[in-house]
Image (cartoon, helix red, strand yellow):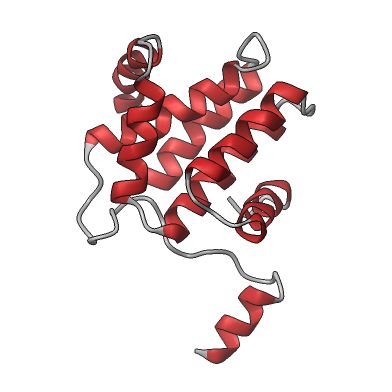
């Protein structure tokens, strides 16, 4: 056990907790899938458009992290896009994520956000600002945020 912990702190291992279950260990509900998806789509759209690489990364991350079937994604994307357009809804999704995911899971979600930022090969100031806002709103430390970004950069998510 200690070897695994040491390798994590050396940066050799990744956070193993997934987003397939909430902090209580129950399978994540569709509402949490949509909440995460809204934030990923919001990130992808911060630079005035969603690049094809960003859209592909969003879908791949949702399938991997939430164990979603590919055929369920179009409906979820439609729901998330509609929810994203309602004023003030982003705040509600952040609250839901904070209430249902533990610190490690929120860090993993931030790593997913960074993966979207990096998907098109460029980081603009709006994307950077959104990612920083999310780490603050997820109540993560600077070290946790740096680890999340590193996970995305090194392909560990």
Q: Identify which residue, 117 or 64, lies in the foreground.
A: 117
Residue at image point 40% right, 16% down: 84
In the image, residue 101 sits, relative to residue 36, either above or below, namely: below
Residue 66 percent location from the top left of the image: 36, 44
Q: Is residue 115 visible?
A: no
Residue 144 percent location from the top left of the image: 61, 58
Residue 101 percent location from the top left of the image: 35, 52
Residue at image point 32% right, 29% down: 92
Residue 119 percent location from the top left of the image: 68, 30
Label total for image: 0
Q: Is residue 16 left or right of residue 14?
A: left
Q: Identify which residue, 140 or 120, lies in the foreground.
A: 140
Residue at image point 23% right, 61% down: 24
Q: Is residue 6 visible?
A: yes
In the image, residue 41 sits, relative to residue 148, either above or below, namely: above
Which image quadrant for residue 23?
bottom left
């Amino acid at each position: 056990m200690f070897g695994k912990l040491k390798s994590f702190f050396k940066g050799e291992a990744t956070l193993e907790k997934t987003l397939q279950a909430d902090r209580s260990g129950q399978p994540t509900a569709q509402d949490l899938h949509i909440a995460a998806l809204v934030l990923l789509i919001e990130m992808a759209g911060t630079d005035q458009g969603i690049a094809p690489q960003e859209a592909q990364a969003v879908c791949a991350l949702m399938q991997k992290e939430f164990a979603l079937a590919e055929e369920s994604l179009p409906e979820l994307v439609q729901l998330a896009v509609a929810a994203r357009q309602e004023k003030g809804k982003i705040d509600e999704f952040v609250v839901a994520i904070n209430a249902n995911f533990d610190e490690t899971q929120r860090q993993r979600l931030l790593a997913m956000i960074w993966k979207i930022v990096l998907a098109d090969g460029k980081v603009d100031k709006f994307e950077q600002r959104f990612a920083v806002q999310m780490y603050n709103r997820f109540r993560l430390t600077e070290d946790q945020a740096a680890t999340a970004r590193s996970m995305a950069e090194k392909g560990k998510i």
